[in-house]
Image (cartoon, helix red, strand yellow):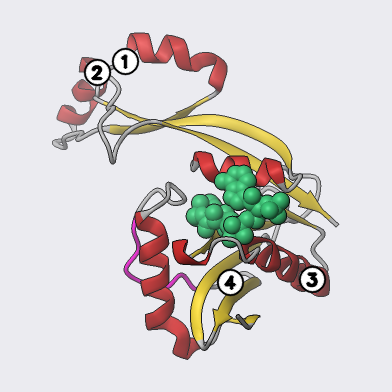
Amino acid sequence: MEMEIREYRPEDEAEWMRVHAIILSISHAWNYSIQERPLYEGHESTKLVAVADGKIVGLTDTQYENEPGEFCFLKDSKGGYVLEFGRLPDFSGHNIGKLLIDATVEDAKRKDFHRLEYWTQDRSAQRYYQRIGMKEIGRHYRFRMRATPEFNEIAVKDYFGIEYIYAICMPEEWPLIKQKYDILTKHPLEPHLCIGYEIRF
Ligand SMILES: CC(C)(COP(=O)(O)OP(=O)(O)OC[C@H]1O[C@@H](n2cnc3c(N)ncnc32)[C@H](O)[C@@H]1OP(=O)(O)O)[C@@H](O)C(=O)NCCC(=O)NCCS
């Protein structure tokens, strides 16, 4: 099978959205579904697709910071934050992930960026990043909880309601938070451990 990594083109949009939707349905790679292709206006970006026999089978997008710490976790230099990364489930075993990562690294270098951050809540992707030797840079829990009377009191004062609170905490606080608060545990609102990895070049 001929595999090509090339830049995303505007005419790829509808196919890109379909591939994205399939990857979304079989992974915990993203927090929410999207109906519009992200554009990263006001920032440099690398947008690549993997193409096999004329069809898009994988994708990756990286947005670069204008200032260190704008959206990356590490703040020592301006970095690239990888927002989209995956391939269709039928195309495992072709090393598409690594081809997309390597091509992103080459483009980042051309743009004078020298580090990338990959954050994921998907446990399989976490194992994959470890397997290919990426360095862990941080982890936290992301969870949703019902509002306590104190939160509801604030909301009621200003005439709004709280459906749930979407929150983040460090792993060491998680056992206590689970005990103290009413955490939503049913899919698709269940808690996830999110782990960040980086590559420098
Ligand atoms: C992450 C992802 C792109 C990797 O896919 P891929 O590049 O096609 O991986 P391959 O099947 O070709 O495997 C390549 C190598 O990685 C290993 N590997 C693949 N998935 C793995 C996993 N979940 N855990 C550990 N190792 C894994 C394979 O064993 C193989 O190793 P080898 O070269 O020694 O044989 C793919 O799993 C994916 O798209 N996942 C869904 C979306 C997602 O979670 N994205 C990241 C979140 S932000």
What residue do we see at 49% from left, 43% from top? 122
Between tags 1 and 3, which lies in front? 3
* Label 3, residues with CA under 10 Å away: few <14, some 14-19, many ≥20: some
Tell me the distance, in whole angstroms, between the alpha carbons under discs 2 and 4.
39 Å
Magenta residues, as a range?
33-39
Residue situated in front as seen by the camera: 66 or 17: 17
> Do labels 2 and 3 touch, CB within 8 Å?
no
Contact between marks 2 and 4 (CB within 8 A): the answer is: no
The crowd level at tag 1 (other Cα within 10 Å; few <14, some 14-19, many 20+) is few
First reached walking from the N terminus: tag 3 or tag 4 = 4
Residue 190, image x, y percentages: 33, 33
Above or below, comparing residue 156 to residue 55 in the picture: above
- Residue 112: which quarter of the image? bottom right
Q: Amino acid at mark 1?
A: Tyr
- For the residues labelled 2 and 1, the Cα–Cα distance comes to 8 Å
Q: Nearer the viewer, mark 3 or mark 4?
A: 3
The answer to which of marks 1 and 4 sits earlier in the sequence is: 4
Disc 4 marks which residue?
A: 42
Q: Marks 2 and 3, Cα distance to the nearest angstrom?
A: 49 Å
Q: Quadrant of residue 160?
A: top left
Dot 2 or dot 1: first in sequence order is: 2
What percent of the width, then of the height, locates residue 78?
A: 75, 56
> Does ligand 1 reach within 8 Å of label 2's beta carbon?
no
Identify the residue position indicated by label 2 in the image: 148
Q: Judging from the image, what secondary structure is the residue with disc 3 in?
A: helix
Residue 106 is marked as 3
Which is more N-terminal, label 4 or label 2?
Answer: 4
Question: Residue 71: in sight, yes or no?
Answer: no
Task: List the residue tagged with mark 1.
Answer: 181
The percent position of residue 168, horizontal first and vertical second, equals: 46, 30
> SS of the residue at dot 1?
loop
Dominant SS of magenta comes to loop
